[in-house]
Image: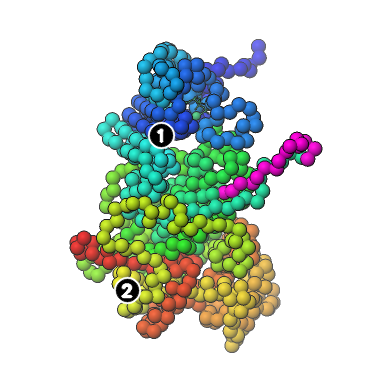
Amino acid sequence: MGRIHVLSEHVANKIAAGEVVERPASVVKELIENSLDAGATRVRIDIEAGGRKLIHVSDNGCGMVRDDALLAFERHATSKLKNDDDLLSISTLGFRGEALPSIAAVSRLRLETRDAGETSGTVVEIAGGRILTVEEAGLPAGTSISIRDLFFNTPARRKFLKAESTELSHIASLVTHYALAHPEMHWELHTTTNALLVAPPVATHSERIYQVFGKETLDELIPLAAQMALERVGLPEPPPWRREPEYEPPTPGELRVHGFTSKPEIQKLNRNSIFIFVNGRLIRDKVVMHGILEGYRNIIPPTVYPVVLLFLEMPCTEVDVNVHPSKTEVRFRQQSFVHDFVRDSVRSALMAARPAPAFTNEIHASASARVALTPLLHGSADDGFHASAIDPCAVDLPQAEAGAAGEFSVFSLIPRQPLPRNGALPFDGSMEVEGNGAMGAVRIAAQGFGEEGAEAQSANQSGAQSSYQYANPEAVPETASRCALPLDGIDDAMDLSMLCTLKPLGQIRDSFILAINPQGLWIIDQHVAHERVLFEKILDERGRRQVEAQRLLMPIIVELRPAQQAIFTEIAEELRRNGFEAEPFGIRTIAIQSAPAGVTADDVSEMLQELLEQLEHEEQALNLEKIRTRIAASIACHAAIKVNMPLDTAKMEWLLAELAKTKYPMSCPHGRPIVLRYSVKDIQKAFKRI
Ligand code: ADP
Ligand code: MG
């Protein structure tokens, strides 16, 4: 007798169920998506024991007639697809017809449903995939599904469930994000003891963020909106000989994005606070993730992550959602388009806002909550730039306790507690001000250089930029300014254009400039401020081929390792254009004859070594733009005013004025913050005046 046999459908169902139903949150996700597909405007979720005991989802969607209520539990039974052509243009969240049978196979399920057009509804009870009862009943229109005893018949899976609180936090996070994606709907999430979320419909995403997270979080986010016409369609067209006479070429459509990115001083230790929706579907995706992080490149350090909520919309033919059983992964037909669009949209939003970092800036983080459906990418191989160079610019601050490192920072529904402190800077003797995450990172962050991106080289990239239409944030309904939030008295919104109104008072330890204006007290890191000024100046001069150089009195001899030699050869020409002239001087030895203005003879060799080392460790192919920005960042770092350098008032004024003129006064080319602000409101709060 042969060994191979076909599994019974019952067993097959259980196997497949493993793919769709990983944990309680995945059940909730499937049920919510069904409610959304059914056109519901109200969804209520009830959870007992982290979903192990009960998951109940009820909606006011279209409901099902009796026959459909039974068919729904057949594998591959769906109302959302008819033929394989439909697979190319899926506009619903579900389409595989797998969720209900998979869930029913591993739980005790009760379905109550009534189609709005019928007078009575249907109740179906199933346990472990077997139908127990089917009854007619008087029911409200819509659908309600309760899942009891999840995994009761698959003990191995049950054993792998995490603590109830962990499972609940996954569910809460998931529901929150669907609630954020659909502000027009009424959402509720309850446990037996708590109402975790009650969010009646609102008009805008900003209002929904306010409802769910409060004003402080909203203040920490920058609204973003952009659209771009696609140049072509992603799917291949049929060849001419196959086209019908009335064939019309498809119109390419457009990419749209809206959402929120966080101000640069919000720095998370992992990617769990980045949420990506594509056509209403919560997904994890490397392409979009990379685009977002590229948008932040040189604005925040490469080792930290922003908070981002991104809603991408595109023609459904541009995205293949049939990639993974749980439908959390997608494939874009025009990946690099999507990537660059995301990157440039994030960049533009950050540029337009030019926000000034404040002292208090951690979005409330809950250590216990983690998100099931966020990308769990580890490390940052795809960041491609981690240099180990010791930062010559490190400031001798008492090192902030890195206690925050390793803590999970996600949006959570747990009521706000006092903000977590990354490190407290003693301030004015008696009062403490919270340092922002980046302050702690000043000494520990690996130094990284990256491309400056589109903005720094507008000359080269204006072509690309001009094809984009960035919606004016003012014109977008979802802006913070539009939604009617109870703003209290003092408006402390300010941006860095105010830098030129600052009056310098003096320096702390000859390193940090203290300055005031009517909006508050500002602290400026003099080294990184000058670094930013020089960085932009060098790139600009390079664009106009006018980089200043200085001849060295004596050539400086530098010995190179073979790998360094190879890189040096590759970038020699670009170095020369940046004022760096060197000639071969024996085997793997070069003589530097001139250096960029501002870099002293003592620094030249070290700078070159550092630069070569960084480029050597670059994982991605070097391109001219990358080489240029790295050279510029290197020169800027070495030519800039150092810490521990006394500055007179005129010099401080000059520096602030120059900084005000830069495109990114908020962070240095390595992503560290330049300016910290202590607003009048913060001061009043600290003195308990408000
Ligand atoms: P899919 O969503 O991929 O079609 P499911 O197994 O999730 O597969 O659901 C099967 C079918 O059951 C759906 O196509 C839909 O017609 C119906 N259905 C499921 N949930 C609901 C609901 N909440 N309201 C109305 N119809 C539903
Ligand atoms: Mg479904």
Residue type, mark 2 in image:
Asn
**The quadrant where residue 509 appears:** bottom left
**Residue farthest toward the right in the current orientation of the protein:** 241
Q: Which residue is mark 1?
A: 41
Examine the rendered structure and indicate whether residue 13 appears above or below residue 19.
above
Q: Is residue 546 left or right of residue 479?
A: right
**Residue farthest toward the bottom in the current orientation of the protein:** 553
Residue type, mark 1 in image:
Thr
Residue 361 in view (yes/no): yes
Q: Residue at x 48, y 24 (%)?
A: 100
Q: Residue at x 47, y 76 (%)?
A: 640
**How would you classify the magenta stretch by its main secondary structure?**
loop
Say what secondary structure mark 2 lies in: strand
Distance Cα–Cα, label 1 vs label 2: 49 Å
Say what secondary structure mark 1 lies in: loop
The quadrant of the image that shows the C terminus is bottom left
Examine the rendered structure and indicate whether residue 330 appears above or below residue 582.
above
Query: Bounds of the magenta span?
Result: 240-255
Q: Which residue is mark 2?
A: 517
Residue 127 in view (yes/no): no
